[in-house]
Amino acid sequence: MVSGVINVLKKDRIVPVLSLDISVPDGSKSQLQLFLGDSESEVVAAFAEAHKLNPQQAESLAVQVHERALFHRLKPLAELPVAGESKPFQMFHGDVLSEAVGRYAEE
């Protein structure tokens, strides 16, 4: 039940799916939040502009956000088209191939 409530809160953009505390150039910390449906690149670009990150810092942040999104299973590690199916097969961080295939077959 609790996970269902959390999923609704994430879907309704009340609770972020990813939140990172980032040290910014002025020496303070700021929180980058990614909500369900957000574009990683747009969120990072807006954060970088708001906090005056240089291009190297912005790129490093983009890599960190992408790696965290993969780790937290927000994005698949691999996505493969399946003949005759509209939904692709997806593998996420921590998946066991046989279990992922079983889940896909059940859907």
Image: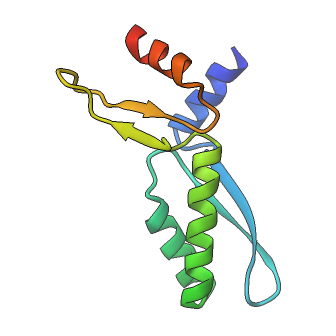
Coloring applied to the structure: rainbow
64 shown above or below 107: below
x, y percentage for residue 23?
77, 77
x, y percentage for residue 97?
53, 25
Asked if residue 5 lies left or right of residue 23, the reply is left
- The number of numbered discs placed on residues in the rendered structure image is 0
- Residue 43 appears in view: yes
Asked if residue 74 lies left or right of residue 86, the reply is right
Asked if residue 21 lies left or right of residue 89, the reply is right
x, y percentage for residue 53?
61, 87
Q: Residue at (54%, 44%) from the top-left corner?
A: 13
Give whichever of 94, 28 is nearer the camera. 94
Q: Residue at (46%, 53%) from the top-left corner?
A: 38
- Residue 16 appears in view: no
56 shown above or below 46: below
Q: Residue furthest left?
A: 84
Q: Residue at (45%, 66%) from the top-left corner?
A: 41
Where does the N terminus fall, quadrant-wise?
Answer: top right
x, y percentage for residue 76?
48, 41
